Amino acid sequence: MLVAGQKDMQQLDQYTMERIGLPGVVLMENAGAKVVEEIMNSLPLEQAKIVVLAGGGNNGGDGFVIARLLADKGIKTLLCVLVDVEHVKGDAKVHLDVYKNRHLPLFELSKNTLENLKKELNIADIIVDAMLGTGVIGAVREPFSEVISIVNDYGKEKLVMSVDIPSGVSSDTGKVEGVAIIATKTVSFVLPKKGFFLAEGPRHIGEWKVVDISVPLLAIQELGLTLPILITKTLVKSSLPVRPPHGHKGTFGHVLIVGGSRPYVGAPVYAAKSAFFSGAGLVTLAIPENIYPMVATQNPESLLLPLAEQDGHFAEHALEELLSRLSTFTSIAIGPGMGRFDGGERLIKNLFTSLAKQSIVLDADALFFIRNQLDMIKHYNGDVILTPHPGEMATLLNTTVYEIEANRLDVAKDFAVNNQVYLMLKGHRSIIATPTGEVYINPFGNDALGKGGSGDVLTGLITSFLAQGATPIHALISASYVHAEAGEEQAKIFSQYGVTPLDTIDGIRKELIKLS
Ligand SMILES: NC(=O)C1=CN([C@@H]2O[C@H](COP(=O)(O)OP(=O)(O)OC[C@H]3O[C@@H](n4cnc5c(N)ncnc54)[C@H](O)[C@@H]3O)[C@@H](O)[C@H]2O)[C@H](O)CC1
Ligand SMILES: [K+]
């Protein structure tokens, strides 16, 4: 499933209406009819009262269609137009006239009071939000902002169904300047919008669904639109590494995890366990020798490689004894719990100059150590995967977290293309970008993973799938999905508060059962 922004939708609309001649009023009728279908499935409607809040643009036009079709089904419906009806133009005006020709109840806020509108909303069971769609610009103005606040004050008392996008949310950025509807459900047309998965978008869309309104999706290729790809379970099932039944541990690869330091003993343990428990044939865990005893007791399933340490971290030359053996590893992850220390840059440089072609995952402070060595990364002849959270991304780009979060899709894509790496920009709705500029969005996951160790589990999972033969993009797609779903599922048992990295590792195995 692809994800669209405002300009993409405008191009698709124009193509449909101008190139193939399907009139906008037909699209609007289709849009309204599909929303009504969703409403009919939402509640026992015999006694239900529905208020349709309509703006002055085409989103409002959808609302006119919805109100008419509901009324024609005998459902108690009130259409409330928040702008002066004289200002309604084009396709929306056609449908407003059709509504009026049916002599159906019409509440015009411009000729009434907000108090009276509030009285109508108080007795409604369902509120349809057809105020603003992809055409919203900037902070929502009066009277929309007041009406939106009234609707949001009802909280979960009423079912709020947003048409195309919750009013006030930017379809491109997910930003909300001022107020925006908090929807119970969003019924969106043609494609999900980028804003659903960015900034405040996820908190406003509620349960979302996309409906077809006869805009031909094949037009996307014909228009040459390159759109982000939404990660779905179907996509993941075809991305997971294949495990031949006759496979042996050599078939499923040998993972090397390099990490750990005196303050961070758990991180490498979580990464190694995650790699092992998600199917890697063998896992070697290279840690500074000072934490070897603690790690050994917690990681009986891994081969342990204590290396030279200095002041509780790896010594600068620590990997020397490892470099001659690098070819025994299928995929390598460096960084979990590594910490920052003098000589870290050189340690990473030595590793890269000694690597053959293995895929390498860089996480945590390994990302700090490469911030001034991106040229080396770019020219490495194997696949490099970076998994920064926004703070680590800000360090890599020498900018602020605010700048990163304000433009997640482009930041991830530009960095991946400019540095020829695979990048997973972590966060609520992770973004994955490839060296060729493809962008994927992971719509899964919740705050249960918001704690130390979750990232280490993800690093181990990615490295494990690489070792089992997945390509970098397939490893990232499947690991980000499985990791997020594991967190969500385990939160149902331990609450969002209580999910630990080991619970997530356990959850990963449960997800892998569901996917196999
Ligand atoms: N192919 C499709 O997806 C179809 C989508 N449809 C619907 O059309 C809207 C987009 O309609 P558009 O007229 O471009 O814009 P909106 O109705 O979203 O809003 C424009 C409307 O709102 C006013 N406005 C803009 N910014 C603000 C603000 N900050 N505060 C207050 N008012 C604002 C502006 O003046 C206009 O009056 C799409 O979302 C779908 O719902 C078609 O119906 C069918 C095909
Ligand atoms: K809307």
Image: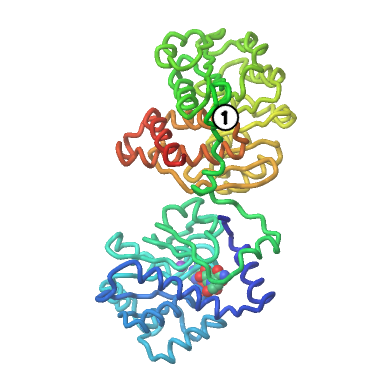
Q: Look at the picture and state if 491 lies above or below 251.
A: below
Q: Which residue is mark 1?
A: 468
Q: Residues within 10 Å of mark 1 (few under 14, many from 20)?
A: many
Q: Position of residue 16 (x, y in %)?
A: 64, 73
Q: Is residue 194 left or right of residue 379?
A: left
Examine the image and state in which quarter residue 128 appears.
bottom left
Q: Which quarter of the figure is the N terminus placed in?
A: bottom right
Question: Which residue is pictured at 73% across the width and 30% down the height?
Answer: 375
Q: Which amino acid does the dot numbered 1 rest on? A: Gln
3 with respect to 453 (left or right): right
Q: Position of residue 23 (x, y in %)?
A: 60, 80
Left or right: 126 in relation to 378:
left
342 versus 405 height, above or below: above
In the image, 332 versus 135, the foreground residue is 332
Q: State the residue in front, 330 or 96.
A: 330
Residue at the limit of the structure toward the front, as seen here: 246
Q: Residue at (37%, 70%) from the top-left corner? A: 39
Instruction: Say which quarter of the image contains residue 257.
Output: top right
| Residue 312 placement (x, y as % from top left) | 50, 11
State which quadrant residue 82 falls in: bottom left
Measured along the vertical axis of the image, is residue 47 above or below residue 192? below
Secondary-structure class at tag 1: loop
- The residue located at (62%, 62%) in the rendering is 8
